[in-house]
Image: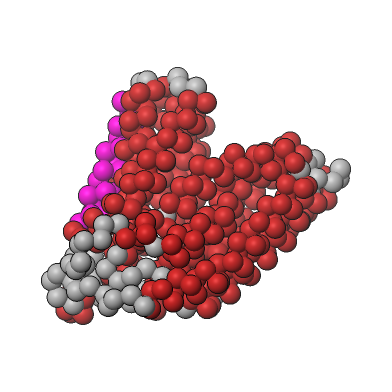
Amino acid sequence: MPNPLPPTGPQRTLALAQLSNSVGDGAYYVTSALYFTHVVGIGPARIGLGLTVAWAVGSFVGVPLGRIADRRGPRGTAVLLALATAVAVASFLVVRDFALFLAAACLYATAQSGLAAARQALLAGVVAKEERTGALAHLQSTLNAGLAVGAALGGIALSAGTTAAYLAVFGVDAASFLLCALVLLRLPPVPAVTGDRSVKLAVLRDRPYAVVTLLNTVLLLRMPLLSLGLPLWITERTEAPEWVVSALFVLNTGAVMLFQVRTARSVNSIPTAARALRRSGALMALTCTVFAMSAADSPWVAVTALAGGSVLLVAAEMLHSAGSWQLSFDLAPAGRTGEYQGFFGTGVTVARTLGPLLLTALLVGSGTAGWLLLGGTVLAASYALGPAARWAAGVRAATVPAPAVARGAWAGARAAPRDGVEG
């Protein structure tokens, strides 16, 4: 099995930054809804509305913030956005009505969307091209490990059930982003990019990349499946006990921690990424078929089908992650990584926003037919990604050479790492 730790140097520093804030996020995810409903007194419907509006705002600002990372330097931008996220989380401590909640949620979603784009641009600057997918696999494993630890801490707060316990969780999450900012400062600075500034937000005019992003968004519908679709399906349509929901979450998280790096090793080019995505789509179609079988009257049949489907689901997830990471970087022009990553990341926001509505209608409303329709749609999108990626790559090959960097080549920056971090 591959080394679970990323190589020393920038990759390990990025992983430490990921670990620091994912622990806080894990605690936040499992406690925030109950805090806002039970302590603050905001109704569930208004919380859902506020979060939908906030992430919609975040999806719009991700591209311009990614562009700022390209123009001003991704390390400094990432540090500032990590600090902004810490401020947003800390502001939840004083939220006492819906208006303040909406403002804080919009700040949180904006900072998180921009931070994701800036971090991708930062990774592109400190990690060699052929190592990026592997580095992202390590980061994904680290993310899952941190979320698991954070979820356990959040569980302790839920068990206590006191206002002080909830507030402690938000304090820990805010502190985790402060620590993330400090860790990111250990990375060497990545030169800002100069070049033709006449084309603003060129990604919005890049139709091939937009098609790839749209098709990838269809595959991202798997994201709310584990957190919402399956729990509703299990409780409403199967005879399986409710504890199966948490067991499937543990299975998914543990598998990604252990096998994401190994899965990503075979993905190192656009053709291998397209192949991984086709395999992911085929596995998702099979996953949906197996999950549909869990509607049987027997609890044992239901549990067996759910366990088998979950194994297929996590395999599809890991292949999709590796393939989409490769495409998102390889199809972005040099000098616009942050901008393009900000746009590609809108697929995650759309899946989080619209996915719950679609999955609820498909699975709870239509049952077995809904599962089959979902599987068929994902399969078709996965097979369409190959031609779309070739189209985008062909257009990219015909464009002008990459813009110059502002402060010398990256090779020079790597020759003089800061704070003892090797390049």
Q: Quadrant of residue 281?
A: bottom right
| Residue in the picture at 46% in, 47% down | 349
Q: Is residue 77 above or below residue 56?
A: below
Q: Quadrant of residue 405?
A: bottom left
| Residue in the picture at 51% in, 45% down | 352
Quarter in which the N terminus is drawn = bottom right
Q: Is residue 396 above or below residue 116?
A: below
Tally the numbered discs. Answer: 0
- Residue 411 location, x and y as percent? 21, 80
Q: Is residue 103 above or below residue 10?
A: above
Residue 82 covered by magenta stretch: yes
Look at the image and give the residue range highlighted in magenta: 76-95
| Residue in the picture at 32% in, 60% down | 202
In this rendered view, identify the residue nearer to me: 359 or 308. Answer: 359
Residue 120 covered by magenta stretch: no
Determine if residue 420 is in view.
Answer: no
Q: Main secondary structure of the magenta part?
A: helix
- Residue 314 location, x and y as percent? 61, 60
In this rendered view, identify the residue nearer to me: 22 or 309. Answer: 309
Determine if residue 58 is in view.
Answer: yes
3 to the left or right of 399: right
- Residue 264 location, x and y as percent? 51, 72
Quarter in which the C terminus is drawn = bottom left
393 to the left or right of 75: right
- Residue 77 location, x and y as percent? 23, 54
In this view, the residue farthest toward the right is 297
| Residue in the picture at 37% in, 20% down | 97
